[in-house]
Amino acid sequence: MLMSLWLRLAAFLAKSLLWLLGLGLLGWALASAWWAWQHSGPVSAQEQIPAGETAMTQEVIQTAVRIVDQHRDNTRYLRDAHAKAHGCLKAEVQVLTDLAPDLRQGVFSEAGKTWQATLRLSNGNAYPQFDSMRDARGMALKLLDVPGTQLLKDRQGRGEQDFVMFNHPNFFVSDVAEYRQNVAAQADGKKVLAFFPGWDPRSWQVRHLFIALATLAPAPTSPTQSTYFSVSPYKFGNANAKFRVAPDPDSCPSYTLPAQNQALPNFLRSALNQQLSTDRVPACFVLQIQRQDPRAYMPIEDTSIEWQESDAPFETVARIRIPAQDFDTPALNLQCDNQSFNPWFGLEAHRPIGGINRLRKAVYEAVSDYRHARNAEQ
Ligand code: HEM
């Protein structure tokens, strides 16, 4: 009697397990199909500005200034993001001599042309911390003496073209509305609310939480060994494109960086110093463009979506060479801190597009003005 009861219980449990497994598989298949349906082309090749974006942008500016104030601890006013620099370096950006005619756009119009440039390498965090902490790593590149009308009225005559990147291909939010909600929660110290703003599971941003966790990655051995992505899209002449800067060791003398002491707080700066200043070996990168194919799922208004290389490859348009140099002096470091890089400093041919870039236009300017004004008062 007892035996048959056990057998019936075991059969019941086995059946329930099978049902659960079946339901799980069905759920997974349905979710995958829904994801594929939601994330398939074609997409718009034009910007689509949602209602209320301007008001949301003003709220983000207030939060950003609050973050700058929060992180000021008897120091100068620092950047709201990417506060810690590993160094500002002189660089040369040479357009490929045999660049295909359809890739000759904006600052890449003249094949073989070499631009002088400044390049700032940074950690992403809002306040300086040990390089060994998980973080995004930034690269901001400024081409100098660029002729032509600048996008921003008050930057005419500055002759800049900036490319502002970090070393992850997609962003942890899609648009301005989500950024406003996420950053406000973080500034209030409510990290869970950043990705789970309410009880309604439809508001949960699980995928975006994983992007944020992946973006906060362990440090590279040197800032010269990371690939940096624009993350958000830009005009590229009449096309839309993302760009990236990737290491190109083959274009430089071969070099192996001696092991750095990663317990030191600024070992990424030490790595740059070792290569460029002590060992006098240049570093090389390529600058590459990925043009949008609107037939594929390559949206303009969602920075959480990485444009797949299988949909559109990255094409090299220029080579970047960072010559051997002594960059780590108090005067050059202060100059570096006082520089401003901004995706909107540049030409119409490279106009930033999409919601996150429209937001950056207002926020970078407001935060940069705020910290410069406060530092000037001191
Ligand atoms: C597409 C994604 C983004 C990338 C690749 C990116 C990258 C960077 C980098 C590399 C810097 C440092 C620039 C330097 O070296 O001076 C920076 C600074 C900054 N970022 Fe971003 N960022 C992104 C999105 C955002 C967003 C959405 C906001 C806020 C709306 C933001 C706000 C700022 C601010 C306020 C600064 C400091 C500006 C200054 O004081 O000069 N960023 N960003």
Image (spheres, helix red, strand yellow):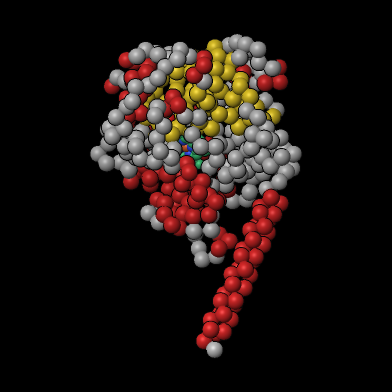
Q: Is residue 335 left or right of residue 2?
A: left
Q: Position of residue 375 (x, y in %)?
A: 32, 33
Q: Would residue 180 be found to the left or right of residue 52 on screen?
A: left
| Number of callouts | 0
Q: Name the residue located 64 percent from the left edge and 61 percent from the top edge.
A: 25
Left or right of 114? Residue 73 is: left
The N terminus sits in image quarter: bottom right
In the image shown, does 14 or 370 lie closer to the viewer?
A: 14
Is residue 6 among what the camera can see? Answer: yes
Is residue 362 or residue 270 the one in the foreground?
A: 270
Residue 99 at what x, y percent from top left? Answer: 66, 15
The x and y percentages for residue 320 are: 51, 18
Residue 377: quadrant of the picture: top left
The picture quadrant where one finds residue 291 is: top right
Quick one: 31 or 212, which is closer to the camera? 31
Rendered position, 271 above or below 219: above
Q: Residue reaching furthest left?
A: 74
Image point 45% across, 58% down: which residue?
193
What residue do we see at 25% from left, 39% from top?
74
Which of the 4 quarters of the picture holds residue 327?
A: top left
Q: Position of residue 346 (x, y in %)?
A: 55, 25
In the depicted structure, whether residue 355 falls above or below residue 156: below
Task: Identify the residue shown where x is 55% and y is 59%.
Answer: 203
Position of the C terminus by quadrant: top left
Tell me if 17 is positioned left or right of 274 in this view.
Answer: right
